[in-house]
Image: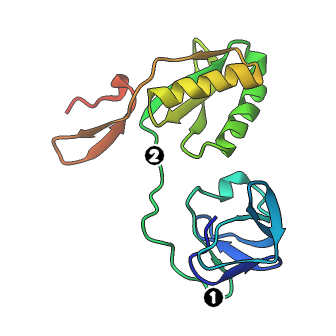
Amino acid sequence: MRVFNGELKAAMLVKLLHSGKTVEVKEVGSFNPKPYVREKLETGETGYITANIKSPLDVKLGDTLTDSRIPSPALAGFREVHPMVFSGIYPINTADYEHLKANLAKLQLNDSAFVYQSESSVALGFGFRCGFLGLLHLEIVQERLRREYGMDIIATYPSVIYEVLKTNGEILHVDNPEYLPDR
C-alpha cells in the first residue's frame, strides 16, 4: 500500500471505502526486500498492513483506506476491473464441485480481475460461470486449476456479453444468443 496523506500505525481503526467496513490495523511494515515491521508508515511511503479483515471480498485492489474518525473521499483514478470474456468451468467428477468452489475462491484471493458465480447445465451438472480479462487470462486460470490444485475440469467455449439496443430504446445485456429479443 501507499500512504498519500497522514500516517498509518498499528491499533488504528481504518475504513475500507469499497465495502464501508471498519477494521483495526494489527501491524504495519515495509519490504526491504523481505518484510519487516515498522512503527508507522507516513505520507509518501509504501508498505503493507495486516488487519482483522474477515473476508477477502471486503477488499478491492486499489481501494482507499481512510481514518474511521475522519473519513476522506476515495482517491481519484480508481476504476474497478470488469471481465470481458466468460466461460463455464465444471468439474469432470460432479463430486468435486465443493473442491472446485474452494479452489476458485483461492484463485480469486490474488487475482481481483477473476470473478465467478454458480451455474448449472443439464449436460454438465453444477459448475461456475467465470469472467476473465481475455483469452490469455482464461488459459492461465485453467492451467493453474490443473497444476496447482490437481483439478480435472471441463471449460465451455468462451463467450462475451453483448449490449443490445432494442427498438424501444431499452438496453439489454445478453450472454447467450438464446436470449436475444425479437425486436
Q: Which quadrant of the view contains residue 129?
A: top right
Residue for point 64% across, 64% down: 1
Expressed as whole percent of the image width and height from the top left, the position of residue 125 reads 64, 17
Q: Which residue is mark 1?
A: 70
**Quick check: can you spot residue 120?**
no
Q: How many marks can you see?
A: 2
What x and y, as percent, mark residue 146?
Answer: 69, 19
Q: Above or below — where is 70 with respect to 36?
A: below
Q: Which mark is residue 61?
A: none
Question: Between marks 1 and 2, how big is the CA–CA gap?
Answer: 31 Å
| Residue at disc 2, secondary structure | loop
Q: Nearer the viewer, residue 149 or 131?
A: 149
Residue drawn at point x = 51 percent, y = 17 percent: 156
Disc 2 target residue: 82
**Nearer to the camera, 155 or 149:** 149
The amino acid beneath tag 2 is His
Q: Quadrant of residue 76?
A: bottom left
Residue at (54%, 43%) from the top-left corner?
A: 113
Of mark 1 and mark 2, the one earlier in the sequence is 1
**Residues at marks 1 and 2 touching, judged by CB atoms closer than 8 Å:** no
Residue 8 appears in the figure: yes
